[in-house]
Amino acid sequence: MGTYRERDKAYVNIALIAVNVMVFLLFELIGDTEDTMFMMKHGAVYEPLVVMRGEYYRLLTSMFLHFGASHLMNNMLVLFVLGERMEQALGHEKYFFFYMASGIFANIISIVVHMEKGYAAVSAGASGAIFGVVGGLVYVVAVNHGQLDGLTNRQLGFMILLTLYHGFTATGIDNWAHIGGLISGFILSILLYRRPRAARGFYMEE
C-alpha cells in the first residue's frame, strides 16, 4: 500500500505569466515599452487620467504592462516562484481573484498617496499584484507554523526588506504600489485562505 499527495498544476499563475509576456511582445512590436508616453497611451496608470477623466480601466491594464525587458523578467521570475505556492494554497479561482484584487488595490493606494503628495507619475507593472502574493504568503506561512513547502517568513521578510530598500534608494519605482500590494495581499489572504485539515492523502492498494 502506498500514499501520495496530488498537487494541482498552478495553471492560473502560468496563464498570468503568459499574458504578461504576450502583451510585452506585442507592445514591443508596435512601439517602445520604455517610452513613457507610449505606455500611458496604451493603459499605464497616470493619476489625472484615472481620477479626473474616470479612466478606471487603467487600474487593471497597467498590471500587464512593463517598462522594458528587465522589468518584465524580474517580475515574472518572482511571480513564477511564489505565485505557484499561493495558487496551491488558495485554489485556482480564489487565486485569480486574489491576484487581480491585490493589483487593483495596490494601484488605488498608490494613486491616493501620490495625489495627497501633489504629484503624478506614469506607472505600470505587475509588482503591486506580486507584492500582494508576497503579503498573502506571509499570512499563509504564519498560520502554517512559520513554514510552507520550505518557504519561511524569514525568507519572505528578507525579500520584502531588500526589495523595498532597492525601491526607496532607486528612482522610477512606485514604492507605494509595492506597499499597497503587501497590505492588500495580507488582508485578502485573511479573508480567502482556509488552512486545510490534516491531510488524509490518497491510497492505492496493490
Image (cartoon, rainbow, N blue to C red):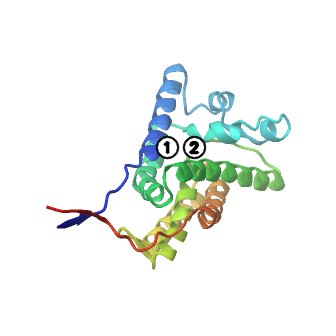
At label 2, counting other C-alpha atoms closer than 10 Å, the crowd grade (few under 14, some 14-19, many 20 or more) is: many
Quadrant that contains the N terminus = bottom left
Q: Which residue is mark 1?
A: 71
Q: Residue extending furthest top?
A: 30
The amino acid at mark 1 is: His
121 w.r.t. 21: above or below: below
| Residue at x 43%, y 59% (from the top left corner) | 85
> Is disc 2 in contact with disc 1, using a CB cutoff of under 8 Å?
yes
SS of the residue under disc 1: helix
- Left or right, 9 with respect to 91, comes to left
Q: Nearer the viewer, residue 94 or 55?
A: 94
| Residue at x 47%, y 65% (from the top left corner) | 159
Q: Residue extending furthest bottom?
A: 145
Mark 2, mark 1: which one is toward the viewer? Answer: 2
At label 1, counting other C-alpha atoms closer than 10 Å, the crowd grade (few under 14, some 14-19, many 20 or more) is: some
Question: Where in the figure is residue 43, as x and y percent of width and height?
Answer: 66, 32
Question: Where in the figure is residue 39, as x and y percent of width and height?
Answer: 63, 31
The amino acid at mark 2 is: Gly
Quadrant that contains the C terminus = bottom left
